Image: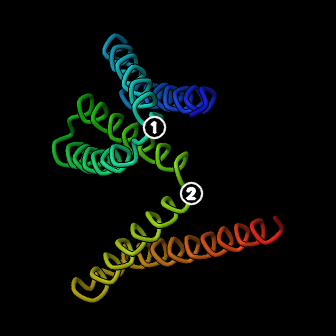
Amino acid sequence: MKKSIRYSVIIALVAIALAIGVYIFAALFFRERLHVLVITLALCCIGGLLGVIVTRPGAQLISAGLIILGLIAISSALYLLHAFNIHERAYTVLGVGILCFFSGLAGLIIRSISDTLLGLIVLSMGALSMGLYFLISLHYHGRAYAMLGIGAAGILSGLIASIILRYRSQAVSGNS
């Protein structure tokens, strides 16, 4: 693995952590500066550590686990935000979840673009089935159409990108 890719991933994750810190600072109405500074520094350290972990050779399973962990952390942080109005701790969990999700995604992308496209298709099928569940079972049309659109667009874009990728790889191997 090239060191430039590793440093690029680490810098991108630290930049995301800094953006999350700025968002937390603004969401808390520019109060609690010390807490926000500690949270931002912790998120930057976590981003750097995750960048080192996912760029190691053979870390595809770890990257997939980080994506799942990130989705769980994001959903529980959103639940804490809306159910209990626990801002500071929920924003910290939300920041960790976002960093885990993006670091896992970066780890998969730098390994294999075809695995990433397969993951996009699988996640889009989940969104499509959730939209169908909202529409058919719950008769909840407001969110159903958004989920159906996201699922359909994700499946179509994943399939088109994998077809283009396969066509280009056959064209390159045919020219050799």
Secondary structure state at the residue bearing disc 2 = helix
> Where residue 117 sits in the image (x, y, percent)?
52, 64
Q: Quadrant of residue 126?
A: bottom left
Which residue is under mark 1?
Answer: 57
Mark 1–mark 2 Cα distance, whole angstroms, equals: 16 Å
Residue 28 is tagged as none
Q: Nearer the viewer, residue 81 or 109?
A: 109
Identity, as a three-letter code, of the amino acid under mark 2: Ile
> Where residue 72 sits in the image (x, y, percent)?
25, 49
Horizontal relation, residue 54 to residue 135: left or right: right
Instruction: Identify the residue at image location x=78%, y=72%.
Output: 174
Determine crowd level at label 1: few under 14, some 14-19, many 20+ residues with C-alpha closer than 10 A.
few
> Where residue 109 sits in the image (x, y, percent)?
53, 50
Direction front: furthest residue:
176
Which residue is under mark 2?
Answer: 113
Q: Nearer the viewer, residue 86 or 64?
A: 64
Sequence-wise first label, 1 or 2: 1
Q: Quadrant of residue 166?
A: bottom right
Identity, as a three-letter code, of the amino acid under mark 1: Pro
Rendered view: 66 above or below 95: below
Direction top: furthest residue:
34
Rendered view: 106 above or below 153: above
Instruction: Identify the residue at image location x=50%, y=44%.
Output: 106
Secondary structure state at the residue bearing disc 1 = loop
**The N terminus lies in which quarter of the figure?**
top right
Q: Quadrant of residue 40?
A: top left
Query: Mark 1 or mark 2, which is nearer to you?
Result: 1
